[in-house]
Amino acid sequence: MLSKEAGNSEVVRNQLQKILSSEVFARNERLIGFLRFVVEQELAGSGDQLKESIIGVEVFGRRPDYDVRQDSIVRTEAGRLRARLIEYYAARGAADPLVIDLPKGGYRPEFRKAKATPPSPAPSRMRIGVWIGFGVALLAVGLAAIVWWRLQHQNSPIPIAVLPLVNLSQDPANDYFADGLTEEVIRNLSILDGLAVRSQTSSFAFKGKQRDVHEAGKQLGVDYILEGAVLRSGQRLRINAQLVRVRDDFPLWAGKYDRELTDVFAIQDDISRTIVNELRLKLGHSRRRYETSVEAYDLYLRARALQIQHGQLGFDESIEPLEEAIAKDPSFAPAYAALARAYALRSGQFRMVVPDEVRKLRAAVEQAIRLDPLLAEAQGALGMLYARDARWVESEKSFRRAIELDAGSSAAHTEFAGFLLRPLGRVEEALYQFRIAEKNDPLTPQFKLNVGEVLISAGRYDEAARSCDQLPADQPGRGRCLGRALLFQGRTEEAIRIFIKSSDPSDRAILGYAYALSGRRDEAEKLAMDLPGPLQQAVVFAGLGDKDRTLEALDRMAVAGPVRMGWILSNPELSLLRGEPRLKALRKRVGLPE
């Protein structure tokens, strides 16, 4: 409940974000979702409806008819949440002016102004006795907090990576099978509680290279590595795998499987269960067992390999084999989930916005969710679809559900940041999600590039320059990232020297912007006339201080939709439009909040 002293809803939301971005809640998406849900419900005036059954359904994905007497997840997580809040306010939040609390006996949060410590009166014997008792109590609480902290950190997720399975076939055309199978093993392990699995993008940095487990483990920041090889011969499948402890290269387990190709799912289950047993984990209830035909699974693995190897182009190329896989087995949920995400990402590029394309996207997402709502990939695609439709509340719920289902997925965090948080101007939250993705996928430069771009949007130009400068020299987008950071640091001539070398239209647009800032207006005008699209022209017109032409160009960009427009309007190049009534009207028209 919101006391009169606690202030308004904006104050509460600011305090909530401060709590959730602290190290106390870092990476704990389940508790983040719990606290965010109850706070938002209270602020919306629905706090009196916060019952255990509702929280179980809305936050933890339980069925509407689940029995709270048999399933104690809400009570258990509420206890953990209260403990985290106590830990936060005992340390980092000790000086915060507002306290968010979840009193025992219910799930309705309270918001109250922090009490100031009164001046100390002269001590009396009675007060000294009370103080001693209070001091003992504080010591007990402190010791309990230390024990709790140690238990929490001892039980923190174990970092593990799966190196690409080696294709033992003489035919390199079978690489797709080994690559796709590797990605499936990564996905199977990622949904296990207690494991922090590195994403396939970083793992595949070691494909085709000499194996040095210790060095790979160091670069990936993991304690354990799963490696192996696969040989497919007709309808027979042979897989060798071993789990290695990185610190001493000690093989904890090795297994050999020589079975029919139809047993591939059973082999994946065996590997997952063996790792669970070796690392003394509990096998969660989120495990699903899929069955499909050999032909459908083969097409599915071909599609996944394309997505791994070729980035956005690979997602486009994967659509055909995924549709073929679905034609052979219309009940194979992972194929629908992969197809839904491929369509959603293609939609995010706004190169495919024709009605037929949108219809296919919706159909794939709906079928993926219907077949298996516990697939993180399907929930992420649903979040992207909702964002495309400017249904922001539903979108956020789906993205958070995807992260809850697979917290180690860099894609889930990246898509949440890129499709919702940054377009809505929630820059610090977007930065937080991108940093999680970067930690989960440490060898993928794209995530460092994402961080640099968001730091520029946040106005943190020195940090952005350092982040961009750490990128490999041949990384696409490095020059633009670094040049923009230098430009907004006031180092205009250095930025111009970077952009003048590029023929990319986006880089030429920023060059025109830089020319305008440096007083070379004629050159800026000439560049604007030569640029191919309204977005690039809008950037140059903004540099020239011409609001009318900037808004006219942006108006022609409105067809791109809310996600793309949200990214565009968050850029500092367009800061001259802040407070402009016509910009507010444009934002409203495309589905962005004012």
Image: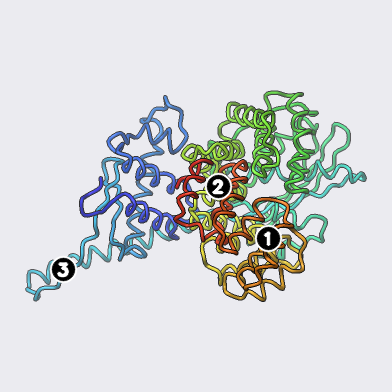
Q: Tag 1's secondary structure?
A: helix
- Whether the residues at callouts 1 and 2 have beta carbons within 8 Å, the answer is no
- Which residue lies at the image location 35% right of the left edge and 59% below the top edge? 87
Q: Position of residue 475 (x, y in %)?
A: 73, 62
Q: Is residue 141 found left or right of 62 in the rendered image?
A: left
Q: Identify the image's colour scheme: rainbow, by chain, secondary structure or one colour.
A: rainbow
Q: Residues within 10 Å of mark 1 (few under 14, many from 20)?
A: many
**Residue at label 2?**
416
Q: Position of residue 93 (x, y in %)?
A: 34, 62
Q: Residues within 10 Å of mark 3 (few under 14, many from 20)?
A: few
**Residue at label 1?**
509
Amino acid type at image mark 1:
Ala
- Whether the residues at callouts 2 and 3 have beta carbons within 8 Å, the answer is no
Q: Tag 3's secondary structure?
A: loop
- For discs 1 and 2, the disc positioned in front in the rendered view: 1
Q: Is residue 343 found left or right of 591 in the rendered image?
A: right
Spatial CA distance of label 1 from label 2 is: 28 Å
**Residue at label 3?**
118
Q: Position of residue 19 (x, y in %)?
A: 39, 56
Residue 122 bears which disc, if any?
A: none
- Is the N terminus in the top left, top right, bottom left or bottom right quadrant? top left
Write down the quadrant of residue 245 in the picture: bottom right
Sequence-wise, the earlier of marks 1 and 2 is: 2
Q: Is residue 238 found left or right of 22 in the rendered image?
A: right
Q: Tag 2's secondary structure?
A: helix
Sequence-wise, the earlier of marks 2 and 3 is: 3
Spatial CA distance of label 2 from label 3 is: 44 Å
Spatial CA distance of label 3 from label 1 is: 59 Å
Give the camera-side residue of 482 and 429.
Answer: 482
Write down the quadrant of residue 317 in the picture: top right
